[in-house]
Amino acid sequence: MKKAIYLLSGVALILQMLMLPIGKVSAASEVIEQYTGGTGSSTISESTRTLQSFRPSKSKLDKIQVEVTAQGGTRTINCSIKAQVSGEWQDLVSCGSQNQASGWMTFDFTDTDVTVGARYAIFLNSSGNGSYPLWKWDQNSGTYPNGYAIHESTEYLNGDYNFKVWGYNPGDQTTDQTVTEQGTSSSSKETPSSNISSSIVKPSELKATYSTETNKQGIKSTWKASTTTSIDGYKIFRSETKGKNYSKVGQTNKSTVEYVGQTSAAGKTYYYIVRAYKGSVESASSNEANATVPTTATPSKSTKPATETAPYSVSSSFELSPLSWYLAGVALILTLILVWLIYRRHKKQT
């Protein structure tokens, strides 16, 4: 009996240890197809065929963006992705509906399988009251090589609407990142974008101080939220030189106006700016704030160099794989059997 208990204890422990690193790490989505050079405008009406075709270079799509100019009234823009099958456009996935807004509108949808190199299209129409919103385009001199614009029944083979398609391959590597209550810390070398929109109000009153709170030790940045409510969130940039050479160290969602950066060196001064963002468009920079790490500060658990790689990384969209769930179930069953055997042994002794 004693040997059986020891054996089951060992097997259950091994299974529980094995299942920990077997996580499904979602690949990082990126812009895979785009055209952004259009300066003209075309109406997005209720029944007209208004679309931009494209050929994806990745096998999963999860988001599209279109550059729109809102008009008067309460118009809603409806979006869908369609696939061309035997010369006909067939529904693939709905991207949802949003109230019209000037600038780059982002439509997120369920991650969708596509065939690399096949023809797909972004379809837009509008509903509601007021003037039709406008989709920015270049009617005759678009330079996107893998598709073209269609308006009403006319194919503009040399025309393109302004659009971005986001996607990924399931096997792509993700950037190592640590998710905390304050936001996402990243080893990315992303710098402030030149794609700035005046329609996104910049965050303000940025302050930086060194925090010694438990589990929040590091430079804490706080700021006043952007008054633009349709943003996706905020990006935090840092530099070791005042006024230049910033790179992104983290980001938060739009409801979080605090970030604690835990990768820092004792005695060093760091300079921060924050930007609001929506899709790939950013606001102007906030004011610059700086803080100096005390010379007596102890290294935090997140002070590893950006080039260091963990044994396995977990993205913000981490979930257990089917194998992990199976191993967890087996470990649970073995644990229950073990408890029962211990109970029987104890009962016999008494």
Image: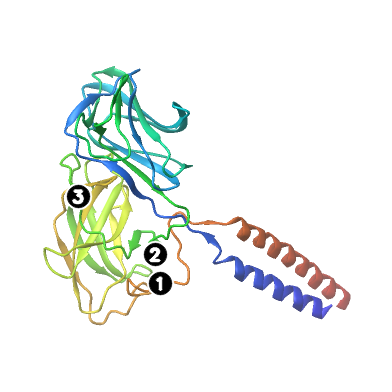
Residue 149 position, x and y percent, is 29, 30
- Mark 1 lies on a secondary structure that is loop
Crowd around label 1: few <14 · some 14–19 · many ≥20 (10 Å):
few
Residue drawn 74% across the image and 66% down it:
334
Q: Amino acid at mark 3?
A: Pro
Whether residue 256 is situated above or below residue 39 in the rendered picture: below
Precedes in sequence: disc 2 or disc 3: 2
Looking at the image, residue 12 sits to the left or right of residue 174; the answer is right
Q: Determine the CA span between mark 3 and mark 1.
A: 33 Å
Q: Say if mark 3 contacts mark 1, CB within 8 Å.
A: no
Q: Determine the CA span between mark 2 and mark 1.
A: 8 Å
Residue 51 position, x and y percent, is 33, 28
Precedes in sequence: disc 2 or disc 1: 2
Image disc number at residue 309? 1
Q: Quadrant of residue 43?
A: top left
Crowd around label 3: few <14 · some 14–19 · many ≥20 (10 Å):
many
Q: Quadrant of residue 8?
A: bottom right
Residue 307 position, x and y percent, is 34, 72
Task: Quickly name the residue at label 2.
Answer: 176
Q: Determine the CA span between mark 2 and mark 3.
A: 27 Å
Q: Say if mark 2 contacts mark 1, CB within 8 Å.
A: yes
Residue 159 position, x and y percent, is 24, 31
Labels 2, 3: front one: 2
Crowd around label 2: few <14 · some 14–19 · many ≥20 (10 Å):
some
Task: Quickly name the residue at label 3.
Answer: 203
Residue drawn 34% across the image and 27% down it:
124
Q: Amino acid at mark 2?
A: Asp
